Every structure is written in C-alpha cells, then in structure tokens.
Image (cartoon, rainbow, N blue to C red):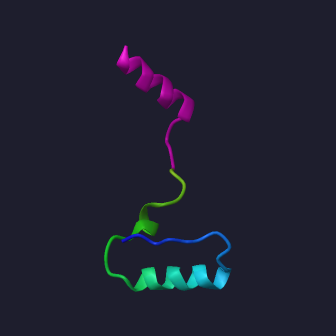
Amino acid sequence: MVTIIKDGSSKAAIRNLLEKLKTNKGFDAKKYSGVIKLKKNPLEIQKMIRNEWS
C-alpha cells in the first residue's frame, strides 16, 4: 500500500491518513521504526565489517 502525502498538506490531513493506516490489519511498520540500541560503538562495528571484506 502506498500513501502519498503532498507538499502543503495540513497536519489534520496527515493525521487522518495515519489513523486510516492504523485500522489496516497488516504489517506494523511502527513496531520496527525508531532508534537502534547497539551494544558496541558504531565506529567499531563499521571497522569490524570493513575488516571482514579484506
């Protein structure tokens, strides 16, 4: 499903679209969005991945 939000849409219109999405029974994208909680420093993870390539 594609939702198009046009430039200049009011906040009320966007909230209305979001409410319609909540009633849709399907994939819950909000469950997987947000901040990732890492156990290591992101720079260390990046270096580790780059070392695996060489």
What residue appears at the point 42 percent right and 26 percent down from the top-left corner? 49
What residue appears at the point 67 percent right and 80 percent down from the top-left corner? 10
Decide: is 35 above or below 10. Answer: above
Indicate yes or no whether the magenta region holds residue 46: yes
What residue appears at the point 53 percent right and 59 percent down from the top-left corner? 34
Q: Position of residue 17 (x, y in %)?
A: 51, 81
Decide: is 23 above or below 43. Answer: below
Q: Position of residue 31 (x, y in %)?
A: 43, 67
Location of residue 43 by image quarter:
top right
Decide: is 53 above or below 21. Answer: above
Residue closest to the eye, 27 or 2? 2
Q: Position of residue 19 (x, y in %)?
A: 50, 85
Q: What span is in magenta?
A: 37-54
Residue closest to the eye, 4 or 43? 4
Residue 41 in view, yes or no: no
29 to the left or right of 7: left
Residue 45 in view, yes or no: yes
Decide: is 22 above or below 42. Answer: below
Q: Position of residue 7 (x, y in %)?
A: 64, 69
Main secondary structure type of the part rendered in magenta: helix
Q: Quadrant of the N terminus?
A: bottom left
- Picture mark count: 0
Q: Quadrant of the C terminus?
A: top left
What residue appears at the point 54 percent right and 35 percent down from the top-left corner? 42
Residue furthest to the left: 26
Indicate yes or no whether the magenta region holds residue 47: yes
